Each structure stands twice: as structure tokens, then as C-alpha cells.
Amino acid sequence: MSNSEYQKKAIDHYLLSIIDAKKAYVLLKSLCLSRCPEIVGEKLCEKYIWVWKQHNDFFGIVEHCAASTFITKILHGFDDSDPQDRPLTLKDIDQNAYTNFVNEEQNKKILDQFRELRNKRIAHYDKEGSDSNFPPFNEIDAFFERLEKFYDALIAEIEGASVIRKQDQDLKQSIEKVFQNLYSGEKNRLLQINMEYLWNKDPKKISSR
């Protein structure tokens, strides 16, 4: 395999990882913000939380899976293990550019946080516990902006490489519709139960007179 073919394979591999990571992050962020009245407002937050309570186990596992997928996928491009033992990474495209990116203070800080979360809370269990917390969303948002610019710069000289296309808004709308449909469906189901047991079966209803 020629060097250019190897680079193309590496960039295609990482493109899928960064797209999956971004989708998982959008899902995670949306679910977390749905429970923040200071973000979505008191009235809307009540609706989101009401839906959560009807399907608490489901939303809990979805949120956990979104966090695990996001962290695992975002680190695919930043594996520093022996080249013979690791998958393709961004280092295989341009080692100097990669080194500069991961050593930048903000990037190094957040990548180290992701690695600790992966190693001590996702991939393994640390019996001594972990003080690592999930980075604030504004820091992750800024990291994604830097990462996408870095990716665009890497592929500029690679013929046939695919650019990252924004898909955030479509996914956000889909998540919103899930909440809306569950809210509407559950409210209608409860209304039907109310109608059946508190109205139709009430011996005092006017049609029984």
C-alpha cells in the first residue's frame, strides 16, 4: 500500500469515528440539558423530566451509552500505543501536525480527562475511585471546533478525502421529536385510562340515568 493510500485509509477511518463521536455527544448533551431549567426554562423542563420519569430506565441507559460511545470514539484518533498494536490514528496522516495538536494546552487537558474517564469509569473499574469529572459542555464544544479545523487542515492535501458535514441540527430535531412524541403518547394513554375507569365505568354518569 502506497503512503497516499495509507493516509486515505487512515483519514476515512477517523472520519467515521469523529462523526460517531459528535452524534453521541449531541445526544448526551441534549439529554443532560433537558433536565436543566436554567437552560430550557421551568415549563419546558417539567415536560422533559415528566417524559424521563415515564421511561427512566430507558433514558438512563441511553445517556450512559451516549457518554461511553462519545469518549471511546473521540479517542480513536489519539491512541499513542505501539503502531503495531493500535488502529489507524491521526498520527498516521501527519505526525508533526498531530503532535502539535495534542500538545496544545487546552487539547492536552481535555484529552487527558477523556482518557481517565475511559480507563477508570468506562473500560475498567478503578477500585480506588476516580476524581475525573466530565468536562463542561462549553469546553467540549470548543474542542470539537478545534478538532474539526485540525481535520480539515489534514485532509487538504489528500485527494478524495471526505469533509465533515454538519449533522447536528437534524439529530437535535430528531431528539426533540422523540420527547414530543413520548409526551403526547403518554398523555393520551393516561387520558384514555382516565376516560375508561373514571368516566365510562362510573355508575353516576348521565347515560346511566
Image (tube, grey):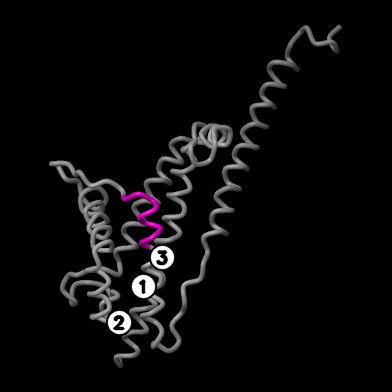
Label 1: which secondary element? helix
State the residue position of label 2.
Answer: 93
Locate residue 24: give its quadrant. bottom left
- Whether residues under marks 2 and 1 lie with C-beta atoms below 8 angstroms apart, the answer is yes
Q: CA distance from mark 3 to mark 2?
A: 19 Å
Q: Which disc is residue 101 wearing?
A: none
**Residue at x 59%, y 53% (from the top left corner):** 173
Find numbered disc 3 in the image and state the secondary structure of the residue it sits on. helix
Q: Which one is nearer the viewer's eye here, 23 or 55? A: 23
Query: Residue 51 appears at what percent x and percent y?
Result: 54, 35
Q: Residue furthest bottom?
A: 2
Q: Residue 149, how many percent across, how many down?
A: 40, 73
- Residue 45 is one of the magenta-drawn residues: no
Task: Establish if 102 lies above or below 61.
Answer: below
> To which residue does mark 1 refer?
14
Q: Which residues are magenta?
A: 135-143
Whether residue 142 is in magenta: the answer is yes
Q: Amino acid at mark 3?
A: Glu
